[in-house]
Image (tube, rainbow, N blue to C red):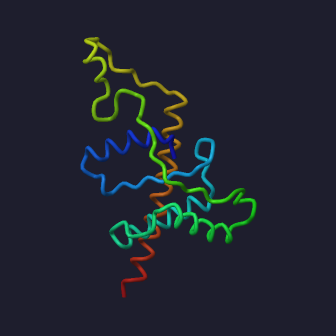
């Protein structure tokens, strides 16, 4: 749910932590921030649930398959919930333009020989947006947990 260049930085950190095999990143071709259709979100969530069920990424994550799945889901939703066509695309974002990430927050200072103080935490629109994003992800995680709990209950005698 972030700009593509941030996805590059996130992928770099995940890869450096040795967890690259767990990460999949999806992109839609549509202007604006978080401009996903409900059917696209549900198609991506379906792929994630399939990954949890199978314990690997065998589900189809290519744009053609995701668009087909989102198109089928869109038919089940009210017309006002699907104001456009699914638009998953293959995309390779550019580099993250900030010179730091979670592994080393201030390397540029060392290179330049400049002594920088660590930033003082402050409430800003960015931090509010981060909290909102975390809350949205927590909602998705709770939903996935409930799905897994229901599936486990159906499997047990």
Q: Residue at x 70, y 60 (%)?
A: 82
Quadrant of the image occupied by residue 125? top right
Which residue is found at the position 28% from the left and 23% from the top?
107
With 146 as the anchor, is 106 left or right in this view? Answer: left
79 relative to 10, above or below:
below
* Figure quadrant of the C terminus: bottom left
Q: Is residue 103 above or below residue 76?
A: above
- Percent across and percent down for residue 144 are 45, 64
Q: In this orientation, which residue lies closer to the viewer: 32 or 122?
A: 32
Q: Nearer the viewer, residue 56 or 129?
A: 56
Residue 132, compared with residue 82, is above or below; it is above
Q: Residue furthest right?
A: 80
All told, the count of numbered labels is: 0
Could you tell whether 81 is left or right of 48 in the image? Answer: right
Give the left or right position of residue 130, taking residue 105 as reference. right
| Residue 134 image position (x, y, % from top left) | 47, 45
Seen at 68% across and 70% down, the residue is 75
Q: Is residue 106 left or right of residue 34?
A: left
| Position of residue 102 measured from the top left corner of the image (x, y, whole percent) | 32, 35
- Nearest the eye: 34 or 91: 91
* Residue at position x 41%, y 25% in the image: 121
Compared to residue 121, the image places residue 48 above or below, namely below
- Looking at the image, which residue sits at the far bottom? 157
Residue 26 percent location from the top left of the image: 48, 54
């Amino acid at each position: 749910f972030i700009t593509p260049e941030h996805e590059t930085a996130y992928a770099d950190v995940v890869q450096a932590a040795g967890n690259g095999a767990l990460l999949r990143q999806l992109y839609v071709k549509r202007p604006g921030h978080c401009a996903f259709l409900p059917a696209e979100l549900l198609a991506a969530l379906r792929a994630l649930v399939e990954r949890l069920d199978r314990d690997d990424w065998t589900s189809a994550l290519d744009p053609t398959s995701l668009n087909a799945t989102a198109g089928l889901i869109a038919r089940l939703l009210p017309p006002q919930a699907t104001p456009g066509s699914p638009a998953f695309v293959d995309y390779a974002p550019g580099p993250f333009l900030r010179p730091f990430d979670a592994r080393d927050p201030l390397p540029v200072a060392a290179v330049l020989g400049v002594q920088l103080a660590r930033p003082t935490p402050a409430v800003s629109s960015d931090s509010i947006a981060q909290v909102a994003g975390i809350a949205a992800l927590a909602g998705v995680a709770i939903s996935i947990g409930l799905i897994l709990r229901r599936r486990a209950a159906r499997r047990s005698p």
